[in-house]
Image (cartoon, grey):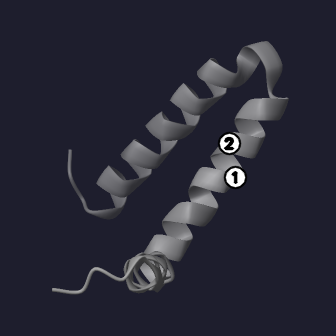
């Protein structure tokens, strides 16, 4: 069993650097920055953005 903390951190970092995870992390960072600057409209803006994403995926997949 490997108990080296540096090795565990390296493994976790490698997982975060996978392309799919990097996209997710960049999206999370973008959302956090936008949330910070949108003021009082931030919740409504994210609800609208999520709805647009949801329905665009459904339309792309041909789901009704």
Percent position of residue 13, x then y: 49, 79
Percent position of residue 4, x then y: 36, 83
Q: Is residue 44 above or below residue 5?
A: above
Q: In this view, does 52 lie to the left or right of 12?
A: right
Residue tagged 1: 30
Q: Residues within 10 Å of mark 2 (few under 14, many from 20)?
A: few
Residue 32, label in figure: 2
Q: Do the residues labelled 1 and 2 touch (CB within 8 Å)?
A: yes
Residue at image position (40%, 86%) is: 7
> Which one is in front, 56 or 35?
35
Q: Residue furthest left?
A: 1
Q: In whole angstroms, how far apart are the C-alphas of marks 1 and 2?
A: 5 Å
Q: How crowded is mark 1: few (under 14 residues within 10 Å), some or many (20 or more)?
A: few
Percent position of residue 27, x then y: 59, 58
Disc 1 is placed on an element classified as: helix
Q: Is residue 55 above or below residue 16?
A: above
Disc 2 is placed on an element classified as: helix
């Amino acid at each position: 069993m490997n108990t080296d903390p540096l090795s565990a951190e390296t493994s976790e970092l490698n997982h975060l650097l996978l392309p799919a995870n990097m996209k997710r992390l960049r999206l999370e960072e973008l959302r956090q920055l936008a949330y910070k600057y949108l003021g009082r409209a931030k919740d409504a803006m994210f609800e609208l953005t999520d709805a647009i994403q949801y329905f665009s995926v459904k339309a792309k997949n041909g789901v009704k």
